[in-house]
Amino acid sequence: MARTSRTRDIIVVGGSAGALDALRSILAGLPPDLPAAVLVVLHVGEVSYLPSILVRSSTLPVVPASSGATIEPGQVYVGPPGFHLLVHDSHILLRRGPRENLARPAVDALFRSAAASLGSRVIGIVLSGSLSDGTAGLRAIKRCGGLSIVQSPREAPVPSMPRNALWHTDVDHVCAATEMAGLLSRLVGEPAGPSPEVPTEIRLEAAIAAQELADMRADDMLGKVSRFTCPECHGSLWSIEDGSMLRFRCHVGHAFTADTVLSAQGEEIDRMLGTLQRSHQERAALAHRMAERERASDRHALADHLESRARGYEEDARLVLELMRNGFPGAADTHKQESVIGHAEVET
């Protein structure tokens, strides 16, 4: 049975690299009596000063989100580092659930929980950022009756997140960040309409982020076991067909889009190559040291042999360094993915 609802009074915003200026522009343009709450997740490090930065340009009060707080209209709630910012009915939950797309807080986790709890009352916004966090969450918002807004990739400093959202989601509005405040002011006054029943898979994934569910039975309900391993815990990954998106989850709950798995694998290769290069350098230094001692003891043949081995280790280290420079750098992998994803010039 469909749930009745009110106006679209919950705005959830997600972004990563390059999203800060866009977010400041949105908050500066909103009316101070906005009849909606704004919940924000940006990918941040271990320490964040985001609330104090945003409050300087916002017309609305900006506060760090606190678990258990009632969501009030006219407030901006910012997800803190190390915790997923989640919505449960009319309250905020902060949970150290499994990372999604290598992030916590994750945009998908916020969007999905808001969609599962509040249905058609939700407006989701994807801003600038790399890879595709936010796309699956935006799809969940749409499936639960909400509205979707995406920053124009043409103006986004890092267009991957907007492009992915456009490619995989039936987006309602695409616009520049400077136009979003006016658009939101109009949308929040519209009736939300009825909310459809929340799909089981959306409820399951929202529960995993809230640490209410994490076992293999849930994974079997979400997808099928793949041949790939989790970049975080190295357990098996379940593949999830989410419309045109291919996503993955492990039994711990770590979640990834396919391009995030590729990026994480590139970073793992970088780490492995860095360890290998250091090992060859250390072996070369040790062999040189041993050769010096042998030569000081007039064991020249053994010293020559050790020097030869040292030169071999140094050559191995040079080969690994060349591979790191030109073969498998994680950053290059990410750029290649963004180039491939760039075929989604939907709005350009």
Image (spheres, rainbow, N blue to C red):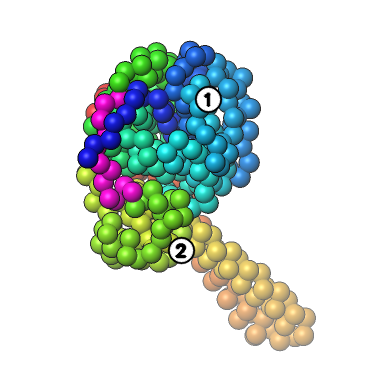
The residue sitting at 38% across, 61% down in the picture is: 250
**Looking at this view, is 232 or 337 the one in front?**
232
Residue 75: x and y in percent read 53, 25
N-term-proximal mark, 1 vs 2: 1
As displayed, is residue 291 above or below residue 167?
below
**Looking at this view, is 318 or 274 the one in front?**
274
Mark 1: give few (<14), some (14-19) or many (20+) Cα within 10 Å: many
Classify the position of the C terminus by image quarter: top left
Mark 2: give few (<14), some (14-19) or many (20+) Cα within 10 Å: few
Residue 213: x and y in percent read 41, 58
Magenta: predominant secondary structure element? loop
Residue type marked 1? Gln
**Looking at this view, is 296 or 43 the one in front?**
43
Instruction: Give the residue number, with chain letter if any, for mark 1.
Output: 75
Q: Is residue 269 magenta?
A: no
Instruction: Give the residue number, with chain letter if any, for mark 2.
Output: 233
For residue 156, which quarter of the picture?
top left
Classify the position of the N terminus by image quarter: top left
| Nearer to us: label 1 or label 2 | 1
Residue type marked 2? Cys
Magenta stretch, residue numbers: 192-203
**Looking at this view, is 77 or 170 the one in front?**
77
Residue 51: x and y in percent read 60, 29
